[in-house]
Amino acid sequence: MAVRVLVKNNEPLEKTLKRLRKICNNEGITRELKRTSVYEKPSEKRRRKERERIKAIRTAKKKAEKAAKKKKRKHRPR
């Protein structure tokens, strides 16, 4: 997985690095690197995957509820 950040004209290096870090965080690259830097026991791996699965279910449920609310109050007279 390669991430490219183009340096704009007269842009300071710190700002470019900040953009790179932001991209890496959004893509989950930083989290993955931290996770794979240390050995993870199979039981810990199962627990982590279960937590991730539950989190995904919760976020999908919240998203669906939000969409239903939005659809419900679509045309409200003032």
Image: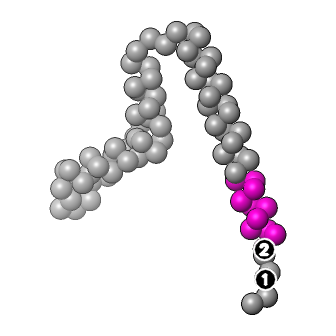
Please give the name of the residue rendered at 34% of the width and 44% of the height, measured from the top-left corner. Answer: 21
Residue placed most toward the observer, 15 or 1: 15
How far apart marks 1 and 2 lie (CA) works out to 6 Å
Q: Secondary structure at mark 1?
A: loop
Residue 5 seen in render: no
User: Do the residues under discs 1 and 2 have CB atoms within 8 angstroms?
Assistant: yes
Q: Does 30 sit above or below residue 7? A: above
Range covered by the magenta-colored residues: 63-73
Horizontal and vertical percent for residue 58? Answer: 69, 42
Give the left or right position of residue 75, taking residue 55 as reference.
right
- What secondary structure is the stretch in magenta mostly built from? helix
Q: Which residue is mark 2?
A: 73
| Quarter of the C terminus within the rendering | bottom right
Residue 53's x, y, as percent?
A: 67, 31
Asked if residue 46 lies left or right of residue 65, the reply is left
Mark seen at residue 76: 1
Q: Is residue 13 visible?
A: yes
Question: Looking at the picture, does residue 71 appear above or below residue 58?
Answer: below
In this picture, is 12 found above or below 23? below
Amino acid type, residue under disc 1 in the picture: Arg
In the rendered view, how is the structure colored?
Answer: one colour
Image height check: is 19 above or below 57? below
SS assignment at label 2: loop
Q: Amino acid at mark 2?
A: Arg
Image coordinates for residue 16, horizontal then vertical, percent? 26, 51
- Most extreme residue toward the front is 78
